Every structure is written in C-alpha cells, then in structure tokens.
Image: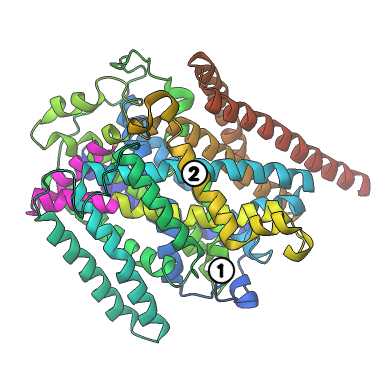
Amino acid sequence: MTTVLIVILSFVLYLVAYHTYGRYLARRVFRIDPDAQTPACMIDDGVDFVPSKRSLVFGHHFTSIAGTGPIVGPAIAVVWGWVPALVWVLVGSIMMGAVHDFGSLVISMRHRGRTIADLSGSVVNPRVRMLFMIVVVIGLWIVLAIFGLVIATIFKLYPTSVIPVFAQIPIAIGLGFWLRRGGSMLIGSLVAVGLMYATIWWSSGLEIEGKHGIFYPVMLDYLSEIGWWTLILMIYVFIASVLPVHVLLQPRDFINSWQLIIAMGLLVLGVLVARPPIVADAVRMVPEVSVNGNPAPPMLPFLFITIACGAVSGFHCLVSSGCSSRQLKTEGDAQYVGFGAMLTEGFLATLVIVACIAGIGMGTLDGEAAWLRYYQQWGGDAGLGAKLTPFIQGSANMIGSIGISEHFAITLMGVFVASFAATTLDSATRLQRYVIAELAVGHESTHKAGPIRSLIANRYGATTVAVVSGFLLAISDAPVRGLENAGLGGLTLWPIFGATNQLLAALALLVVTVWLVKSKKPAWVSAVPMVFMLGITSYAIVLLAKGFADSSNALLLGISVLMLVLEIWIVIEAAGLVFSKKAEEKVSE
C-alpha cells in the first residue's frame, strides 16, 4: 500500500465516519437539542464559562487534546510495524476515542459543565467521585511533567523554535483583544497567522552558535538545560492558567488550530508530490533489544497504551467536560467539537505514522538505512529527543519536496510540536486547578472550609500546587542522574502516562455507559470500548508494575499499584449500581 493511498483512504474514512456514525450518536444516542440552554449561557462568568463561536471552541479544544500525544505515541509505536499502529489509530479514533470525547462533552453540558470526575458522584456514587478525582489528579500530574519535558526537549534540540513559540503569546493576546472589540475574525486570523509565520521564517534563518543568548535560558549550575527550560515553562503556565480563558488560551489555541491545518496541509501535499515509499516493516512483533540491554515490551498490550492520543485518550474527557462544555453556545456544536476534533486528531496521527515510516527515508540517510537508524532496536528508553527526531525530520523531508527549505521546514515542525504541547500544558494546569479546588473544599463554600483548605482551593493556591508538583515529577530522576542531568530520562514517564491516560479513558467510558443505562439510551456504543480499555489497561499496568519492581523504581511502582487498586474499586462500585438497576427493573415488571 502506498503512502498516498494511506492518506487519501484515511481522510475519506474519517469524513464518512463523521457523517454516519457521528450523526447516529448525535441523533439516536445523545439526542442533541440545539435549542437547549448550555452552561456557558446559563452561568457566563467571563472567566471559565464563556459562550463562544464554535470555530474558537474547536480550535481551543483540538489544540488542547492534541498536544504531542498523537506525535510521540505513534513515533514510538511504529517500532512494532506500521500496520498495527495504523489500524489502531483508525479503528480506535472512530469507535472509541470519538465516542469517549463526544459522550463526555454532552453529559457535562447536561449537568452545568461539571467535570466528568465530579459527575461520577451523581451518576454512580460519592465514593466513585473521590476515587475518580484521585485518578484525575495523578493523570494530570503526569501530563504536566511529560509535556513540560517535551517542550523543553524541543527547545534544546531545535533552538530556532524558541522565539516563534514565545512570540505567539503577544500575538494571541492582541488577537483576543481585537475579537472582543468586535473586529473581523477573518482579518484578525490572517494577521495573527501571518505574524506567526514571519517569526518562524526570521528565526529559521538565524545561525545558532553556542549555548547562550535569547535562544536559551540563563545557563546556571545545579540543573540541566532541560530542567531550566521546564522550570521557565512552569512559571509561564502558572500565569497563563490563572488568566481568563478568553485572554490567552482561546486566541492562542485558535492560532494553533490554523497552524495545524496549514502543517497538515503541507504534509499531505508533500506526500502527494514526493510519494515516498514505505521503508518500515509492516509488522514486527519483537523488536531487537535496545543498546542499554532492555528488551522491547510486547506489542500486546503496549501498542494500545503507547498510542493514546490519536486513538483514545482519557485526558480528552477532562478537556471536554472541564473546558469545552463551558464554552459552547449551543448543543448543536457538540458533534463538531467533540466528535470532529477526535477524528481530526486521528488523521494527524496517521500523518505522523507516514512521516516516520516513509518521510524519514528521504533525507541524508535514505530508504531502509534511515528507518534502521531509529527503529532497528527498541528505543523507548533512549529519551524524548530520539523519538521526536524521526517525526520532525521525516516531516521536514516531505515538506521539502514542495520547494520549502530544510531549515524553515525543521523550524516549522519544531514550533508545531512545541506549540501543541504548550496548549496541552496550559489546559492541563487549568484542569488540575479545578480538581485540586474540588478536592480541597468539595461542594462547600470556601469561607466554610477553613484557612488552609481555602488557600489551596484559591485560584492561585491550587495552581501553585499543580505546577510545583509537576516540576518535581519532571526532575524526579535527579536522585539517580543528578540535578545536572535532571529530566533527560523523561521518556521513562511515557508508559505510565499511557497506562494512566487509558485508565482514565476507560473510567470516563464507564461513567458515560452508566449514564446511558440510567437514561435508557443505547449504551453499547460506550460499553464495548469500555470493556476493551479496562482489560487492555489492567494487563498493561500489571506488566508495568512488574517492570518497575524489577528496576526498583519505587515512585512509578507505587503509582502503578495505586492505579490498579482504584480501577478495580471503581469498576466494582459501578457494576453493583448497574446490576441493582437491572434487578429493580425486573421487579417492577
């Protein structure tokens, strides 16, 4: 199968799925009512609940859920062959991920924009709410650490991406101000995107020498370069996440959504022009042992937790229920945002796979030699840089086939990855703030919760807890590697991120399933993916726990065991409710 055929058929499949299965879910399962009042219109506090145009919400939603998940995951997973990775992305995104995102968005909109974790207390029982909250806190904790490390790694590997990424901040603030003053969205978008690409063009033409200057943080002792970048990013994300959502997050994510469309368009055009041959193995059940002597994990179950974003991702339920449900003006936009954004992410993951299995063979090393350089051995423990490089280089090779210079293409893709990771970092911090505040005071008012709990529940206190804990996890390898190398082993967090993320997806699907059962609506659409995700995630967590025990990694072992216990507990609680409900129905008959 040629790369051109893969891209065209994938696009057609997603288009058909949106207009068939998506429409079925909207009309027959969730019964969307365009006239129903949404939480954004009911509350409209100007901070988190803001009625917005669906294009703005789509941009914010998509860039928040995408991040680098659909890039790093597929870039690792193709080591098991391109066929399993592609099949999982196509099937998973349509039958599981889109249902998960759409369902989480709808039930949150029907309950005043409450988060899926908070809703589990009403849908199942209060104990499940507390257990779900713990899973969410741990999941977001890992997201903050790993996405901070991803951006820091990009800044280190591709320093020309630094200025364009930070230049997006004033550009986005200016766009937001323009739109709030009633300015034309078309004119504002054209100017903002034009300025963004001007910074990329300017930065790509600069020669980067040495390790000082505006491209790098101040070089101090005691911490690695990646560690300093991560610290700077955490300071930035603290500021960004306490601002009203329409000041920075919405306009910057809207700009990034245009960046995504343009980048994906360039990649598709590159594939159509270059028609690069596939240089990767179709299926490889057991990759070679890594240079560090670590054996590759088995394809089953690790393929399904390595590719999370792009197929199905629990983080999406938090964005759907914690952010996007509070911004939609009408339920009629829910399919476009919830279902459509997930399919778009699936198509992005498809392009990532093509870049890694074909585009990588168009550079200095061509054909199979390029593939073997990155994928001959298991490299899941080789660091984030080793996994980001195949995508960025492969994408730049394909874009270069249409006449764009290599320097510009590499800078463009570096900015693309870092910008998307930054939007996820922003949204994850804001979501973690919500959850920490909910855990601190529950449904009490802050003045009744006591001074310490009120301080933690405060917008600034909760955000401080979120960013400090995320930074400490990001440099948690310091006791072994030393502070001067802290963060360099960031990819060791990816398996536990994937497992926790997929567990969160399974639990969100469980809440959606129980809600559908109680509402007497077709529950199979979420029940089938729920059962699959619960089984595959449990298997993966058990294997991960064994590996962490063998390597004496007490922190990740503790997280794995806790996740497994919480999963079993929540499933038992939910199963008891569903079966008791069915028993009551039989008695009433």
Residue 469 part of the magenta-drawn span: no
The tag on residue 518 is none
Within 10 Å of disc 2 (Cα), the crowding (few <14, some 14-19, many 20+) is many
The residue wearing badge 2 is 470
Residue 396 part of the magenta-drawn span: yes
Task: Identify the element where label 2 is drawn.
Answer: helix
Amino acid at circle 1: Asp
Is 532 rendered above or below residue 66? above
Amino acid at circle 2: Gly
| Residue range (magenta) | 388-416
Is 130 rendered above or below residue 544? below
Q: Is residue 256 left or right of residue 549?
A: left
**Residue 491, position as x, y percentages in the image:** 38, 32
Task: Identify the element where label 1 is drawn.
Answer: loop
Q: Quadrant of residue 72?
A: top left
Residue in the foreground of this view, choosing between 224 and 121: 224
The residue wearing badge 1 is 48
Is 89 rendered above or below residue 320? above
Q: Is residue 120 left or right of residue 66?
A: right
